[in-house]
Amino acid sequence: MKQNMHQLNRREFLQRSLAVGAAAAFPATVRSAAEPPKIRRANDIIELGPAKLKVSRMAIGSGTTGGGRSSNQLRKLGVDGVADLWWNGYDHGVFLLDTADTYGTHDSVKVLLKKVPREKIVIMTKTEARSAEEMKSDLERYRQEMGVDYIDIVLLHCVFAPKWDELYKPQMDVLSEAKAKKTVGMLGLSCHSLDCIQITTKCPWVDVAMVRINSASTRMDGDTEEILALIAQLKAAGKGLVGMKTLGEGQLVDKIDDALKFALTKSGVDCFSIGCESQEQFLDNFNRIAKVAQPA
């Protein structure tokens, strides 16, 4: 039964993908008044950033409270267990992987790729390199750990500094070189302060920004409306937006449906990441999103 369910899910995903391709090839010029509005779901295919990289609306986060290796509860699943979690996500049409060096989950990507063709998933990782030399070393190590020739998205991790674009210039130059060589796709950062976000709105180097945003201003850098205003500026500047702390780092579990509905209705946020510690958590989030699915 489980195998049949997986086959059905993948069949549905492939049908949705073909439908997207057909829509792109033959765009409708007139929308029927009787046509229902498009419903936003976890496995929608979204075009992210200036490169219009196709990603799933939901990403499976692989970092939990604190984000460090020692505190990352997801690692209790083991290398194969994390890969299985991502495999289940892929089986449901969720193919954006949110990982990072500090999460300790790169090796699970290599295991996943034994089952999934490289071009069928999107890998987003993050670095805390403190110099150009460390950045060069990190990029090479990351590709070896994951067993890939290229990484779709690389972000500077946990950036607080108001003048981060000056502070991280050596690392940014290395990433720009890697982008030119096509060993890295899009570049950006995960923002962790208001000053950081404000600088990001004006920085042409950034393709993708991760921003903390949820319905209750929990574990965020300002109140919800303040962050949404900055997100609008980021979108106006052509940045791809990935929401994080969707469930307030687990603090919104008692308001989870409201939090997921909020994530689905904010047009400035292209996609969002939710950290999962088990197959059950992923399926619960996925099914709840289907239940609270909102019109575009």
Image (tube, helix red, strand yellow):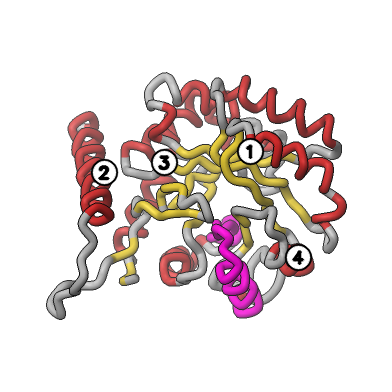
Q: Image check: 283 left or right of 59?
A: left
Residue 241, magenta (yes or no):
yes
Q: Is residue 268 above or below residue 68?
A: below
User: Percent x, y for residue 201?
Assistant: 68, 67
State yes or no: discs 2 and 3 in contact (Cβ < 8 Å). no
Q: Is residue 61 above or below residue 57?
A: above
Q: Which amino acid type is shown beneath numbered disc 3?
A: Phe
Q: Which mark is residue 179?
A: 1
Q: Which amino acid type is shown beneath numbered disc 2?
A: Phe
Q: Would you identify the image quadrant in which residue 239 lies?
A: bottom right
N-terminal-most mark, 3 or 4:
3
Which residue is at a point 26% across and 43% down the rendered structure image? 13
Q: Which residue is mark 3?
A: 95
User: Percent x, y for residue 33?
Assistant: 15, 80
Please tell me whether mark 3 sits on a helix, a strand or a loop: loop
Looking at the image, is mark 3 or mark 1 nearer the viewer?
1
N-terminal-most mark, 4 or 2:
2
Q: Which residue is mark 4?
A: 199
Looking at the image, is mark 2 or mark 1 nearer the viewer?
1
Q: Which residue is mark 2?
A: 13
Residue 139, magenta (yes or no):
no
State yes or no: discs 3 and 1 in contact (Cβ < 8 Å). no
Q: Which amino acid type is shown beneath numbered disc 1?
A: Lys
User: Percent x, y for residue 183?
Assistant: 60, 31
